[in-house]
Image (cartoon, rainbow, N blue to C red):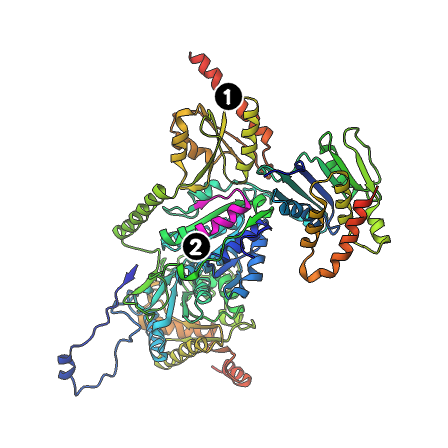
């Protein structure tokens, strides 16, 4: 059941040999030494790292519990050097609720993909949000089912070709993509609803700030946060990593505008402004 | 366990809101206080929601098998449909207590005597609205004592919740009227 | 006023007994005929400082149970048959992650929406198929309200000891009825053993490793090892935890096997059969899994035949047949759809069985 922590530590000799050098970049403590098993160019790794950095910086590693359900996040318990629960498909927010209610001092996050959060787990997502459950949800939206090999997701775009929409998503028979943040922002429960992207250094920095804010809201008891991260899936999109980011910018960002849709911690006017720009 | 009183297999039936379940609980509590085997089983489901209500109460000196009384030796009926449904099931030698104004149509069987009292009307006349149920339990005790009389009084006190103690006195009066009814 | 007998409904007794057993989290969803349990928890749990939550679905409720169990809490959920079907996904994950929890099923008639009257039609589900994959739950079947009061503490203790979910399988009759009950003394919470595997954070005192609650293992050999380890525990449970009650069994030639509410009726039926000269006895399995095979075994030498009496179409009779293993005839009598068998029906079934067995014996001779 338990995996030993294997954070590499340097010997004194090694440290002395590099005394004149300055560390400018290192693995966050919250990540294990395991290599990410994500596909080349996949942005899951970027988001995992941002979460780990936020947890390190907020100094909550020792009391943070992660919940990872089914999808490409399914083995993320190997990557976070935290107590972790693996959850059934779609149920991460319910499992996170159980952990948080049992031990309110824990900091609990659910890390979910689009199929998990917005299809099979829609009920759990909406109700955790409307309860204002004091948890942090990180939502990876890459408009496709990755783990099972590229099927249509609830967030696949109109016309998008996938294994199960081989002629493109026909909205007449397959319906429209769900804009999760816009939907959840109609509820009174959530404290923070924000959509970010990890397609560029600027957006990655904004994503990091949003994730950190979400965790700090949980620490302060402000309530439920969801950070939707627009992500790429080069493998199942059939594109190179760079082309995938271009596709993301050209197709996903127009459909899924970035911004803050709800922020209980901000002055009302400020929240409105943020949602209306970008 | 042994008792001076025989086993009781009682069905109480009427409309929701008449206090059928409370009356059953009163009888069951009397059994509890005399340390007998007791069961109380309500009808549940759609009939809970404003339609008919009935419950089965058993008092026994032996462990109780089925708490569902299918062949009652006593029936308390507070409306016509309940009487029509359960009276034919009462065993020979049993008896039936009913509210005579609410069960106007009766065809008595020789072996199951019927004791009709206008309990709801009496209760209203005495300013004891809603306590016809307790009155009928009193009448049952008069015709078929199932516990010591003091126990019944004690059970009544135990069944009226502490926060509704002002209702104890009216309940006592209703029980008293039932006990005295010829 | 401890140890005073009170009149309480079975459903409420299950809830109160859980609170007295150190249950600090309850996640539920309304369904007849168990709703009083959730309502009781809603009233009492906040006063006890625990967590009560009406989940958005049975599926969510059982996954909240999974989370709270993983966090180390004593946690319970309750439902009735159709709701238990929804919970089976989460139950399978609890089994796979070796997490203890108590799950109450106040059975009603099925299949589908069925009815709301008492039934025992979930025996197969409870003992065979509470979710996909190889696995079992310990399944306890109370027959009285007093037993419901005592059994919940046992369920939590067994769950913690063997790291397994435990089901208490009741039915609408037991859930709805009131009987005199002496409630158990509240458990001293300090007496509950620590759960070093719980997800309390890597910074928790004394921790040197991180904990993962997980049923996933993508390496074939590893998954098999985990399953083997779990089944070794199941063997221990089978050896140590079988429970059954017997009645008039010492000289019994015709042995009724019945559980739960049905066993109350079967007991009266056995008495009636005795009154007409049939040497009848009763075995009441209290653990449905593990099935009390040793009690069946003990009754076999004197038994001419077995009769499984159930409120279903014949489910536990499979386990009686497996235990008897061809060494005596095993017959079944049951009613379904909320119809409760009567003692007279059981006595008649016993008389018929005696006649059949005697006739067969005569023919052979």
Q: Residues within 10 Å of mark 2 (few under 14, many from 20)?
A: many
Q: Is residue C53 magenta?
A: no
Residue that mark 1 sits on: C354
Residue extending furthest toward the bottom: A20
Give the left or right position of residue A221, taking residue C193 as reference: right
Residue that mark 2 sits on: C101
Residue B81: give its label.
Answer: none
Q: Is residue C151 above or below residue A11?
A: above
Element assignment for label 2: strand
Q: Residues within 10 Å of mark 1 (few under 14, many from 20)?
A: some
* Residue C186: x %, y % from top left: 48, 57
Give the quadrant of residue A144.
bottom left
Q: Is residue A98 above or below residue A211?
A: above
Task: Pinpoint the chain carrying mark 1.
Answer: C
Magenta segment boundaries in residue numbering: C139-154
Q: How far is the residue under mark 2 from the one under mark 1?
A: 43 Å
Give the left or right position of residue C357, taking residue A148 as reference: right
Instruction: Evaluate whether label 2 is on the same chain as label 1.
Output: yes
Give the left or right position of residue C184, taking residue B92 as reference: left
Q: Nearer the viewer, residue C61 or C203?
A: C203
Give the left or right position of residue C148, taking residue B161 as reference: left
Q: Nearer the viewer, residue A209 or C257?
A: C257
């Amino acid at each position: 059941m338990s995996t030993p922590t294997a954070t590499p530590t340097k010997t004194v000799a090694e440290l002395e040999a590099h005394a004149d050098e300055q560390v400018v970049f290192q693995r966050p403590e919250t990540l294990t030494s395991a290599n990410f098993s994500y596909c080349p160019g996949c942005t899951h790794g970027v988001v995992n790292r941002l979460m780990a950095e936020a947890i390190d910086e907020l100094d909550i590693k020792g009391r943070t519990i992660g919940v990872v359900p089914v999808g490409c996040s399914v083995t993320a318990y190997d990557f976070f050097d935290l107590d972790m629960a693996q959850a059934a498909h779609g149920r991460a927010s319910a499992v996170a609720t159980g952990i948080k209610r049992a031990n309110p001092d824990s900091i609990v996050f659910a890390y979910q993909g689009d199929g998990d959060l917005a299809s099979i787990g829609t009920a759990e997502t909406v109700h955790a949000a409307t309860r204002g459950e004091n948890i942090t949800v990180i939502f990876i939206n890459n408009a496709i089912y990755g783990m099972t090999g590229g099927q249509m997701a609830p967030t696949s775009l109109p016309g998008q070709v996938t294994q199960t929409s081989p002629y493109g998503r026909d909205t007449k028979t397959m319906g429209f993509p769900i804009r999760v943040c816009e939907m959840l922002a109609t509820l009174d429960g959530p404290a923070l609803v924000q959509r970010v992207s990890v397609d560029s250094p600027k957006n990655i920095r904004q994503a990091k700030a949003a994730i950190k804010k979400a965790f700090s809201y949980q620490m302060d008891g402000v309530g439920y946060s969801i950070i939707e991260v627009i992500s790429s899936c080069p493998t199942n999109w059939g594109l190179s990593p760079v082309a995938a980011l271009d596709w993301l910018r050209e197709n996903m960002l127009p459909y899924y505008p970035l911004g803050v849709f709800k922020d209980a911690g901000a002055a009302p006017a400020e929240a409105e402004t943020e949602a209306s720009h970008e | 366990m042994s008792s001076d009183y025989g086993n009781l297999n009682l069905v109480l039936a009427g409309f929701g809101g008449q206090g059928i379940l409370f009356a059953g609980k009163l009888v069951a509590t009397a059994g509890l206080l005399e340390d007998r085997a007791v069961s109380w089983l309500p009808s549940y489901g759609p009939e809970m929601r404003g339609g008919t209500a009935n419950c089965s109460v058993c008092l026994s000196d032996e462990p109780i098998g089925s708490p569902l009384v299918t062949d009652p030796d006593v029936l308390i009926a507070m409306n016509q449909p309940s009487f029509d449904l359960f009276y034919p099931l009462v065993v020979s030698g049993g008896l039936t207590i009913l509210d005579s104004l609410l069960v106007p149509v009766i065809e008595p069987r020789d072996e199951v005597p019927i004791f009709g009292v206008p309990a709801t009307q009496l209760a209203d006349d005495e300013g004891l609205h809603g306590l016809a149920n307790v009155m009928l339990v009193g009448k049952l005790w008069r015709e078929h004592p199932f516990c010591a009389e003091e126990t019944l009084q004690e059970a009544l006190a135990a069944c009226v919740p502490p926060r509704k103690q002002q209702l104890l006195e009216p309940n006592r009066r209703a029980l008293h009227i039932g006990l005295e009814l010829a | 006023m401890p140890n005073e007998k009170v009149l309480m409904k079975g459903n409420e007794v299950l809830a109160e007994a859980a609170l007295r057993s150190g249950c600090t989290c309850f996640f539920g969803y309304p369904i007849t005929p168990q709703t009083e349990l959730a309502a009781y928890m809603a009233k009492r749990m906040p006063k006890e400082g625990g967590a009560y939550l009406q989940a958005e679905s049975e599926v969510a409720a059982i996954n909240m149970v999974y989370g709270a169990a993983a966090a180390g809490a004593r946690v319970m959920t309750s439902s009735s048959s159709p709701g238990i079907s929804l919970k089976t996904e989460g139950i399978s994950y609890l089994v796979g992650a070796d997490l203890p929890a108590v799950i109450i099923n106040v059975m009603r008639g099925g299949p589908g929406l069925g009815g709301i009257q008492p039934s025992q039609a979930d025996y197969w589900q409870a003992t065979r198929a509470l979710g996909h994959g190889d696995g079992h739950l310990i399944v306890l079947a109370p027959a009285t309200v007093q037993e419901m009061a005592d059994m919940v503490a046992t369920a939590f203790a067994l769950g913690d000891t063997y790291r397994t979910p435990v089901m208490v399988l009741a039915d609408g009759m037991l859930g709805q009825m009131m009987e005199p009950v002496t409630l158990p003394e509240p458990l001293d919470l300090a007496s509950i053993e620590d759960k070093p595997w719980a997800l309390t954070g890597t910074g928790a005192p004394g921790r040197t490793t991180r904990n993962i609650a997980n049923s996933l293992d993508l390496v074939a050999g590893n998954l098999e090892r985990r399953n083997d380890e779990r089944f070794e525990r199941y063997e221990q449970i089978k050896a140590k935890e079988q429970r059954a009650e017997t009645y008039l069994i010492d000289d019994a030639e015709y042995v009724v096997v019945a559980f739960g509410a049905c066993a109350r009726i079967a007991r009266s039926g056995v008495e009636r059969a005795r009154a007409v000269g049939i040497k009848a006895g009763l075995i009441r399995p209290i653990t449905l899994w593990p099935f009390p095979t040793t009690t069946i075994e003990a009754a076999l030498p004197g038994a001419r035949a077995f009769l499984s009496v159930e409120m279903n179409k014949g489910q536990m009779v499979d386990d009686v047949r497996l235990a008897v293993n061809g060494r005596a005839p095993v017959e079944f009598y049951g009613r379904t759809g909320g119809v409760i068998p009567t003692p007279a029906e059981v006595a008649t079934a016993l008389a018929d069985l005696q006649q059949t067995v005697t006739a067969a014996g005569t023919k052979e001779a």
